[in-house]
Image (tube, grey):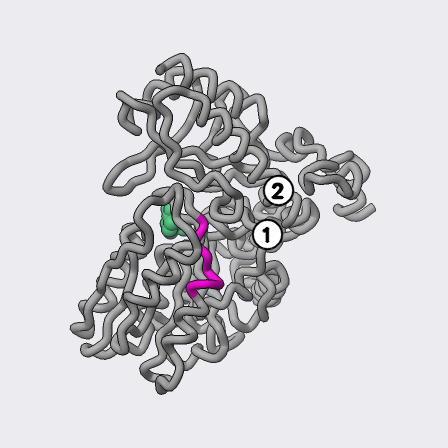
Amino acid sequence: MDRRDFLVGTGLLAVTPTSASASQGVDWGAVRREFRLDPSLTNLGLFYLASNPREVRDAIERFKRRLDANSHDLMPEQADEVAAALGQYIGGAAGDIAFVPNTTIGLSIVYGGLKLRADQELLLNDQDHSWHRQSAELAAQRVGAKVRIGTLYENSSTATEDEIATRLRNSITPQTRAVGITWVQSSTGLKMPVRACAQVVADANKGRKQEDRCLLIVDGVHGLAAVDDDAARLGADVFVAGTHKWLFGPRGTGIAWVNPQVSDQIVPLLPSLSNRSQTALLGPGGFHPFEHYYAVKAAVEFHQRLGRNRVAARITELATRFKDGLASIPGAVIHTPREPRMSAGLVCFDIAGQSGPQLVERLSQKRIQITTAAYRIPYARIGTAVINTQAEIDKTLKEIRALT
Ligand SMILES: Cc1ncc(COP(=O)(O)O)c(C=O)c1O
């Protein structure tokens, strides 16, 4: 009996969903039991750094044993398998993927390796993560280029695709060498309309030479394995994401996917271990915790078996339940768009009279883990992972209500 049969047989996947909600038909309680979560804690911050399900832990252990037995046995074929699995998962080619230890290093490698001139600029916006911004700033400083920070909407909860696309169109200049955006913003929970942004960038590129081409660089970390879409087909030129958040992959793993049409525009910043492809060369070399890299495949397979659509539907259902509940609490302000089209699994909010950090502290006294968004205004924030439950959402709402 292979692993797949085992999971179906034990009821992880109860029936094929046919009903209105794609998340139905999965025994989410059984999925949750695959994780070693602290049962006394309601953890609505699971996106922060992944907990690993049993089969990922087992895969890490398996590779670790082989390396412990003979550390010369570096299993390069496993790297090919991981790239193939990830390529399939994101709708791209294995050769267009580089392994990186996390989103931050992936973005740093991409901006740092981008062929950038002093007369060019990188255009980010005020809702990109500070490590994304710093990656761009460090790269720009090296060549004397500029980083410009735009604002793509007035109000996160009511922002529209049109508003964002229009503002982006008005911000790009002939000097803009790259536009950096975040698929799902951890500052507001807003899901950026990446395809609309890609169209704006494509229009701006008309008539430009390859060395002047504007690249769309996406920090995709809170979309990968939370949104049911092909990351490699969003229209971005570069997609970077840690696989150690929503994908539940081993900690210290991530990917950078590069559109093959622009791979000649990004040169490696560091020596690489891999000569799999031009893009694979971007992955930093030296020795790594290989058991973690190779076990990413187990995380992809875990998600594929659950089904990307079911995972996204479950995440959305829980987030919507939280937003709906919050909306009925006096003094609550939701900064994340209510509609799933413009949001995913992160919900940012405020409660009148309490700062984000105060709310984190008060809920932690009730054994509820939430976070704040580490931005200018540290909104309170939750993330709904597939292994959270409706009861956890309801309990959190009840405690928030009790605090108001
Ligand atoms: C939007 C965003 N980008 C990047 C990061 C950093 O991710 P990593 O730990 O994979 O470098 C975070 C933080 O968790 C984030 O919220």
**Cβ–Cβ below 8 Å for labels 1 and 2?**
yes
The residue located at (58%, 56%) in the rendering is 229
Name the residue type under label 1.
Asp
The residue located at (56%, 39%) in the rendering is 315
- Is the shortest distance between ligand 1 and the CB of mark 1 under 8 Å? no
Q: Quadrant of the C terminus?
A: top left
Q: Is residue 63 visible?
A: no
Q: Is 195 one of the magenta-colored residues? A: yes
The span from disc 1 to disc 2 (Cα, nearest Å) is 8 Å
Question: Crowding near pointer 2: few (<14 within 10 Å), some, many (20+)?
Answer: many
- Frontmost residue, 299 versus 208: 208
Query: What segment is highlighted magenta in the picture?
Result: 191-197
Identify whether 143 is placed above or below 375.
below
- Frontmost residue, 383 versus 267: 383
Q: Secondary structure at mark 2?
A: helix
Identify whether 69 is placed above or below 21.
below
Left or right relative to 131: residue 1? right
Residue receiving disc 2: 313
Residue 282 point in image, percent of width and height: 41, 70
Q: Secondary structure at mark 1?
A: loop
Residue receiving disc 1: 228
Name the residue type under label 2.
Ala
| Residue furthest top as drawn | 402
Residue 90 point in image, percent of width and height: 58, 61
